[in-house]
Amino acid sequence: MIPQFNQSGVLPPFDPALGPNTQAGRSPYKASTVDLVRRFGTSAPRNTLLGGLLEYRKDLRSIGVTEGFQWIDGSFVENVEMTGGRDPRDIDIVTLAHRPAGLNDSDWRSLVSRSGDLFSPKLAKTKYFCDAYFVDLGSPPQYIVEVSSYWSGLFSHQRNTSLWKGLVQVPLVCDDDAAAALLA
């Protein structure tokens, strides 16, 4: 379940009713894409961004990236309309996923090169309205821990204020068709 914004206009880093010491009540909040659309699809600009996110996810799956999850963050999961007087401009996302089965390092690099709009944050932002980054879960464990720690630390604090906040986690294979239908 995705909680309501707190008084600071962000997702709380943990559910106050459950406390900070229970995994079920802590960020990242596990959700489906339907949950994401229902919770954050509150305006036409937000729905446009959600449409881009769903397209990004579809295109990742079309190249075989199906095992993993995404952390959703940024002003999109904040009440930026109230706190900043503006609409969110993009969706910040980190995909933590396994590469498609059977790909060696050379094949993987080739696929990433051919799919630049999925793996280049600049191109993904232009095409999908997502400031998107990718963590290959086939990487060495120490690297995965280090890069996950980086993204978790970055995403769990507001950039300008360092305010502690929550984020949302969505599995790569989910109810995207139903979520898209809600946007239609």
Image (cartoon, rainbow, N blue to C red):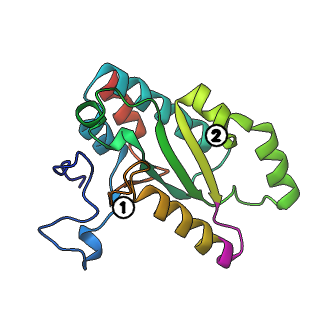
Residue at 61% from the left image edge and 49% from the top image edge: 133
Element at label 2: helix
Q: Residues within 10 Å of mark 2 (few under 14, many from 20)?
A: many
Determine whether, in the image, residue 128 is placed left or right of residue 13: right
Quadrant containing the N terminus is: bottom left
Q: Which residue is mark 1?
A: 28
Callout 2–callout 1 Cβ contact below 8 Å? no
Q: Amino acid at mark 2?
A: Pro
Q: Amino acid at mark 1?
A: Pro
Query: Could you tell me how far apart the alpha carbons at marks 2 and 1 are, in whole angstroms?
Result: 22 Å
Classify residue 74 by image quadrant: top left
For the record, the magenta segment spans 136-143
Where residue 78 sits, quadrant-wise, is top left
Position in image of residue 162 (x %, y %): 38, 57
> In the image, what residue occupies the spot 69% across and 40% down?
120
User: Within 10 Å of the Cα at label 1, are there few (<14), some (14-19), or many (20+) other Cα atoms?
Assistant: many
Residue picked out by circle 2 = 121
For the point 11% across and 68% down, the residue is 17
